Image (spheres, rainbow, N blue to C red):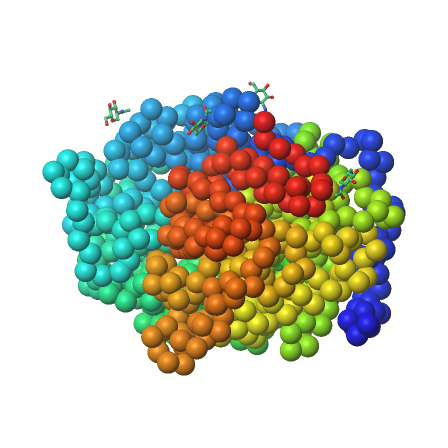
Amino acid sequence: MKLQMIVSILMLSHPTLSDVFNPDPSIFPDWSKYTKFDPEQYIQMKRLGSPSISPNRKQMVYQQYQYNKTTNSSKMNLRWVDISKGFSSAIDLTPNVNGQIDNSPIWINDNTVAFLAVRGSPNLNIFTVSTTDGSINQITNFTNGVMGIAYGSQAKRIAFISKVYKGKGIEESAAQRFQISRFPSSGVVYNKLFVRHFNEYVLGDKYQLFTMPISDQGPIKSVGDPVNVAEKYSGEWGLEPDSYNFSPDGKSILFSAKIEGKKEAWHTEAGVFQGPVDGSTAPIRLNPNFKGAASSPVYSPDGTSIAWLQMATPGYEADQNQIILYNITSQKQTRLIPDWEKSPAIIKFSDDSKKIVFIAPYEKDVSLFIADIATNKVSRYTSDGTVRSVSQIDDKSFVVTLSSMQFPDSLFILDVCQEPGKLNQLTFEDKGVLDKLWLSPTQTFWFSGAMNDPVQAMVLYPFGFDPTKKYPVIYLIHGGPQQSWNDGWSTAWSPNMYANQGFVVFIVNFHGGDAYGQKFTDSIKNNWGTYPYEDIMTGLDILTSNAQFVDPNNIVGIGESYGGYMINWLNGHTDKFKAFVNHGGIFNTISMYYMTDELWPLEHDMGIPWKFHSRKIYKANNPEKFTKNWKTPTLFTHGELDYRIPITESISAFSVLQRKGIDSKLLYFPNEDHFISNPPNQLKWLSEILGFFGSYTNTTVWQLN
Ligand SMILES: *[C@@H]1O[C@H](CO)[C@@H](O)[C@H](O)[C@H]1NC(C)=O
Ligand SMILES: *[C@@H]1O[C@H](CO)[C@@H](O)[C@H](O)[C@H]1NC(C)=O
Ligand SMILES: *[C@@H]1O[C@H](CO)[C@@H](O)[C@H](O)[C@H]1NC(C)=O
Ligand SMILES: *[C@@H]1O[C@H](CO)[C@@H](O)[C@H](O)[C@H]1NC(C)=O
Ligand SMILES: *[C@@H]1O[C@H](CO)[C@@H](O)[C@H](O)[C@H]1NC(C)=O
C-alpha cells in the first residue's frame, strides 16, 4: 500500500505517468499490419558507425556493417550523403561486397576520403576513395595492421596507431612477431601486471601513435616514413594513446594515454600530452597535477586552448568527468561548469572556440549539451534518445548520431536555435525493416528507492498487447555497476526484441548508475548488494501491484557483468523470479578480485580483500555466501576470452545449481570475450535465452533453426 501511494504522488507531478500502468490504447497499432521483431531481423540490421563531416560541411560519410544469416557473411562499406539534399542522395561510396570491411572514414579534402580496409593487402591498411569518381587508392601496405586514423590538414600528416615492440618500427614489429612465433618454446615471463587485458594476453607489443606525411596534391600518397610521436617520452615505455588530434597550425599533436608502469593494473592515471607531430622531441604532459583518468583532449579551432575530461579521484573509473580548459599561452587550467552535477563523456569545441559541445548520460537519455565558456551556462538540446557523436555544420546546426529503443543509430540534423533543439532525420538506412515493426515506446516512471532517493524505471509493452491479459516480465539488469540503461539502440541488447517476443520488459536504473548525478553513482561504494537490490525489488513491487497486465508469478531476470553479479545475488535473496539468465556475471567477489585484469574497479568499490575492514565488505556483498538459499533455475552464458570476469565465475555458479539438482544450463563460447559479438554467436545466444525464458514462462518464442 505504501508503495502505491508513493507512485500516485509522483504521478501528480508527472501527469503522463498513469499511462505506464494504463497505457493509452492509441499507442498500439492494428497488429495485423506488423510482424514480430525477432533476433533474426535484429542481428541482420544495418549498423551505422564512424560518421565524418567534410571540411566544407556539405557531405557526410559513414561506415555501415551488415551480417547476412542466409549466406553467413558480413560486409562493411562506406556510405555518402549530401547533407542539404537528404537521404535520397545517399550512395555507396565504396562497393558493398561480402567479406570486405571498409571502415573508419575521415576526410582528406572535400573530394577525398581516407579509410581502413584490407582489400588484398596483408592487414588493415590506409586507402583513399574519391567522392567524385569513386576511384580507390592504396596508401599503405603494412604487414602490421594500423587503426584509428586521423588527419591534420595543416600538418599534412595522417596519424594512426599500430602495435609495435619497444624501439621497433611498424614492419620491424611484424617481423619480430613472426620470429617469436617460431621460437621452440612458447613460455612467456611476466614481472608485472597486466598478464591479460580484456580479451588477450599482454605480450611485449603496445599500440603506439605514429604520424605519416602525405602529399595532398594530385593523387594522395605517403611521402615519408611514419614516426612514433612518443618515442622520446621519458616515462615508462608503452604509452598507448587512445584519443588524438592535430593542432590547427599543424605543428603539434595532442593525445591522452594511460600512464604505464608496475601499478597500471590498479591505477587509472592517464596523461594528456602534447608533442611535435614529427616526434622530434618528447611529448609534454599537461595534467601532471592529476592522478585520475583523463580522456577526450581537443584543441580549440582558434589554436589558443585545449580542453579535456579529467577525473580527480585516483583509481576511480566512474568519477565525474570535469571539463578542464587549458590556456596554451599561460598554461593555466580552469574547470568549466564546476557546479554541473552530471558527467560528460565526449567533448568538442564549437567552431568559434567559444563553447564546449558535449555528450552526457542524463537520466534515461544520453543528451547533447552546449556549455558557454564565458558564462558557464549549459543548455540541453536533445531529450529522448542516445546521442553517440556530433559534428558541427554551422552556427545553428549539427549532425548527430541518435538512436532510441525504437530505432538504431541514424544521422539527424539538430537545429539549436531553440532549447530543446529541433531534429530532422538525415539517414533512413533500415526503413524497409523498421516500417514492418511495431516497437514499444519507452515509458518511464519514478519511484522512491533506497535512501528515499528518486529512481527511474522503464517499461516496454509486448507485441499484440491486450490490457485484459497478463504477461510475463523480463527484468533487465544493467552492468557496470556505474552504468545505466539508456533509451538507445545496442547491437547486443534489444529490449524491444524481448518485448516483441511476448514479454513486458522492465528496467530500473538503480543506485550506482552514471546518469543521475555523482552522488547517486558514488553510493554504490561498499554497497554492491544493498541499495541496488532494494531498488530492484521495490521497483518490481510497484510494477506488479500497479500494472494489471503483469503476471506477478511469471517474472524472469537477465543481467550481464555486474548485472550477472546481481542475478547471483537475487538467487540467494528472493524467490520472486521463475528463472534467470546470467551472462558473464560475478559469483565470488573475493576470487574475482584476484582473477580479473583491472583491479581498480573492485578496489575502489570494496577495497583490498586482505585488509580487515575491506574483507568484511567483500564477504557481506559476496553472492557465494548465500548459495545455501539458491533455488532459481538459471542459464549461464560466458565467453572463454572474458578476462574481465573469467569463465570460472560462471562455472562455479553452475556447479552450485547442478550440485543442488536445480535446472541449469551453461552456454559456452570459445571465441567470445566479455561480450557476445559475432553475429552467428549472437543468434545462438538469443535463441538459448529466449528458449530458457519461454519454457519457464510458457511463452512461445523465436528459436534458431
Ligand atoms: C542475404 O542474402 C540472401 C542471398 O543473397 C538475400 O536473398 C537476402 O535478401 C539477404 N538478406 C538480407 C537481410 O540482406
Ligand atoms: C559462419 O561464419 C563464421 C565467421 O566467418 C565462421 O566462423 C563459421 O564457421 C561460419 N559457419 C558456417 C556454418 O559456415
Ligand atoms: C603489399 O605487400 C604484399 C606482401 O606483404 C605484396 O605481396 C603486395 O604485392 C603488396 N601490395 C602492394 C600494392 O604493394
Ligand atoms: C590565455 O592567457 C593569456 C595570457 O594570460 C591571455 O592573454 C589570453 O586572453 C588567454 N586566452 C584565453 C582564450 O583565455
Ligand atoms: C501454456 O500456454 C498455453 C497456450 O497459451 C495454455 O494452453 C496452457 O494452459 C499453458 N500452460 C500452463 C502450465 O500455464
Q: Quadrant of the C terminus?
A: top right
Q: Position of residue 276 (x, y in %)?
A: 27, 56
Q: Nearer the viewer, residue 637 or 326?
A: 637
Q: Position of residue 314 (x, y in %)?
A: 38, 72
Q: 201 or 285, which is in the foreground?
A: 201
Residue at left offset 30%, top offset 53%: 196
| Residue 405 position in % (x across, y down) | 66, 47
Extreme residue toward the left, this view: 184
Q: Image check: 203 left or right of 68?
A: left
Q: How many labels sit on residues?
A: 0
Picture layout, residue 17 above or below residue 84: below
Quadrant in the picture for the N terminus: bottom right
Image-based side of 477 in relation to 131, left or right: right
Answer yes or no: is residue 440 visible: no
Residue at screen point 58% across, 37% down: 687
Residue drawn at x 77%, y 48% is 471
Residue at the image position 81 percent from the left and 49 percent from the top: 470
Q: Quadrant of ligand 5?
A: top right
Residue 503 visible in rendering: yes
